[in-house]
Image (cartoon, rainbow, N blue to C red):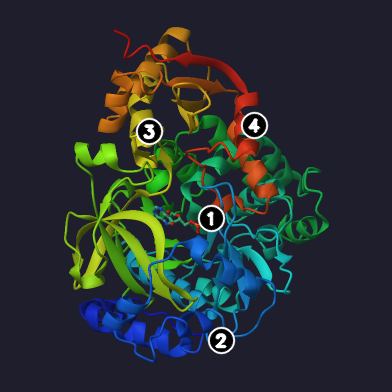
């Protein structure tokens, strides 16, 4: 076992970021040397050159669809060097919530290494400010279904590939983050049973739990919403020492039964704490008195859950986790005390070669001539150390997984530098857009509009539990449809004003001008039944997704008809905006 030293991890990070430019050239050289004989690189005529200039001149920028045929061949069992020099040992499946279709991505040993590097780095900074003791972590993590591709490779979510790796357990031990639940719970075949047992195991070890974690904030909020429903049953299990009959998976029953012994005093204490809470405010510190913080990705599409998470977390700090994707890691959060809304990520210059496509908002006249897929005016990609503070970029990644000049599709803003490595703020995904004609709205625009309109519900203490949208082009003219699930019913009058407010809050010039001339019809707000968004979650988990990696798709395309059907079948009322009526 390695001995974890906070100081040496921080020192290493400081040295690496001071020499960011050098590490970038060196990382690119290693990537190209290791994979130089791969068919993809061979075809581009690099001829063994490994410098950034030749790389940029010979290798085109790509998106996933450009690489799909190559990855498909790997999945089908062609073990010749296609994208990488070494054979690819496994396939990762992206969450697929964006387009409704899951992407195949190469998974390699180097991705495990960079995951561990990111975990250690951010842990070192976190622990310097909020030291945890020896103990456990209540981690809402899940392995997803695995299947074999035609060629016999394991295909599963990227997080599952990581959790299954040897190194994961060692690193978790090093950074005092061992999960309170046994593996059988993490890898159980039924996520609802696993979630129940995570809560139960977390409570059995309640005095030892040092922090609460899930990959994304959505699953933290989801877990505590479920806790509100099952807490009495959990208390009974702890009181009598027998697992509820709702747990039917034999492996989970066996593993959890081993640690469940009758403990009436713990059950009483949990029971009394729960009944003493006001609307579940502060449930986390009440039940886990030694927890130091709540941890998970809370930025980007997770921001809408912060309010509810803060409610459950009471006085405990919320700490936003690192920035990465199934394609590879990008940056670590080394300023853990910043609130999630301000979280930034320092790019690690030795885990990949990074480029940044400068993005500018188009002027009105450019808007009118640009095709609707273009939301920004782009310039040539620039290197990691050349980015400018205050500007927005799309991230391009090249790494050991055989992704070369791969457009990640994320928009980030540079907020500063840590030594010579940029600090990025996550802005939004590029592709998630509401667009009918010249209007263009990202998930961030949608989020801001929903936040604005939801203020009108706040007086009644009603919350928007979740939301999504759809650009309905089957009507003439097309119009935006916003779906809301609410925590309780509201009046028609208030919802009508919310609908108008939503319509007015889309401030994009293309939208406003189209609305004024009725080139886009009145925005429609549809209220869906409680539990509808859980059905969407079930739908994705059924397809092989995983609760902890789940992101609610914020814009449902016409082609994603399963999800659209779930939403439409559960509509209880709808409102059309009157905001632009003359
Ligand atoms: P997946 O493909 O399921 O692995 O999801 C990766 C995507 O999740 C990234 O491309 C981002 O859009 C988003 N994401 C990952 N980490 C963060 C973060 N720290 N903040 C905001 N969004 C993130």
Whole-number angstrom distance, CA of label 2 to CA of label 4: 43 Å
Tell me if mark 1 has few (under 14), some (14-19) or many (20+) residues whose alpha carbon lies within 10 angstroms of its own: some
Q: Tell me which numbered mark, 2 or 1, is placed earlier along the sequence.
A: 2
Judged from the image, the secondary structure of the residue bearing numbered disc 3 is: loop
Left/right placement of residue 241 relative to residue 312 reads right
Residue 207 is marked as 1
Q: Quadrant of ligand 1?
A: bottom left
- The residue that label 2 is drawn on is 86
Is ligand 1 less than 8 Å from the beta carbon at label 2? Answer: no
Relative horizontal placement of residue 374, taking residue 188 as reference (left or right):
left
Residue 437's disc number:
3
Q: Position of residue 192 (x, y in %)?
A: 69, 46
Q: Which badge, 3 or 2, comes first in the chain's sequence?
A: 2
Among numbered discs 1 and 4, the one appearing first in the sequence: 1
For discs 3 and 1, the disc positioned in front in the rendered view: 3
Percent x, y for residue 577? 40, 15
Q: Are marks 3 and 2 in contact (CB under 8 Å)?
A: no
Closer to the eye: label 1 or 4: 4
**In this view of the protein, can residue 162 be seen by the observer?**
no
């Amino acid at each position: 076992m390695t001995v974890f030293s906070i100081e040496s991890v921080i020192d290493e990070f400081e040295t690496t970021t001071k020499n960011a430019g050098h590490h970038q050239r060196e990382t690119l050289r290693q990537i190209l040397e290791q994979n130089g004989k791969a068919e993809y690189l061979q075809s581009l005529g690099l001829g063994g050159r490994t410098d950034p200039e030749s790389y940029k001149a010979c290798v085109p920028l790509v998106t996933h669809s450009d690489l799909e045929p190559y990855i498909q061949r790997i999945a089908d069992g062609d073990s010749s060097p296609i994208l990488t020099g070494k054979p690819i040992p496994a396939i990762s499946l992206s969450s697929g919530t964006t387009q409704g279709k899951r992407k195949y991505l190469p998974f390699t040993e180097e991705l495990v290494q960079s995951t561990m590097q990111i975990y250690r780095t951010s842990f070192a900074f976190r622990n310097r400010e909020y030291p945890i003791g020896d103990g456990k972590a209540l981690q809402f993590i899940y392995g997803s279904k695995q299947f074999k591709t035609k060629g016999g490779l394991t295909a599963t979510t990227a997080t599952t590939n990581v959790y299954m790796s040897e190194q994961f357990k060692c690193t978790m031990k090093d950074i005092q983050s061992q999960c309170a639940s046994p593996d059988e719970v993490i890898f159980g075949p039924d996520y609802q049973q696993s979630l129940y047992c995570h809560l139960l195991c977390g409570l059995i070890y309640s005095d030892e739990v040092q922090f609460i974690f899930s990959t994304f904030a959505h699953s933290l909020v989801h877990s505590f919403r479920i806790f509100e429903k099952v807490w009495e049953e959990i208390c009974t299990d702890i009181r009598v020492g027998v697992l509820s009959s709702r747990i039917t998976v034999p492996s989970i029953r066996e593993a959890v039964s081993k640690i469940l012994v009758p403990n009436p005093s713990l059950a009483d204490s949990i029971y009394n704490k729960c009944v003493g809470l006001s609307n579940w405010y502060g449930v986390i510190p009440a039940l886990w008195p030694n927890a130091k913080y709540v941890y998970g990705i809370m930025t980007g599409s997770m921001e809408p859950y912060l309010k509810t998470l803060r409610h459950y977390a009471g006085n405990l700090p919320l700490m936003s986790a690192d920035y990465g994707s199934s394609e590879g890691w990008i940056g670590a959060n080394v300023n853990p005390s910043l609130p999630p809304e301000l979280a930034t990520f320092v790019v690690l210059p030795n885990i990949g070669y990074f480029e940044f496509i400068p993005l500018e908002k188009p002027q009105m006249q450019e808007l009118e001539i640009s095709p609707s897929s273009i939301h920004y005016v782009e310039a040539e990609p620039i290197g990691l150390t050349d980015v400018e503070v205050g500007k927005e970029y799309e991230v391009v990644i090249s790494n050991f997984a055989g992704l070369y000049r791969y457009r990640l599709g994320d928009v980030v803003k540079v907020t500063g530098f840590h030594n010579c490595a940029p600090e990025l703020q996550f802005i939004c995904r590029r592709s998630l857009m509401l667009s009918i004609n010249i209007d263009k709205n990202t998930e961030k625009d949608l989020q801001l509009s929903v936040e604005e309109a939801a203020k009108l519900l706040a007086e009644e203490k009603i919350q928007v539990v979740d939301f999504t949208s759809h650009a309905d082009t089957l009507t003439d003219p097309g119009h935006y449809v916003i779906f809301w699930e609410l925590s309780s019913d509201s009046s028609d009058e208030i919802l009508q004003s919310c609908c108008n407010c939503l319509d007015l809050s889309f401030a994009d010039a293309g939208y406003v001008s189209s609305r004024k001339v009725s080139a886009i019809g009145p925005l429609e707000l549809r209220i869906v039944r409680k539990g509808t968004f859980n059905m969407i979650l079930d739908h994705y988990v059924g397809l092989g997704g995983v609760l902890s990696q789940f992101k609610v798709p914020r814009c449902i395309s016409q082609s994603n008809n399963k999800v659209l059907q779930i939403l439409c079948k559960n509509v209880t009322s709808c409102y059309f905006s009157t905001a632009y009526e003359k």
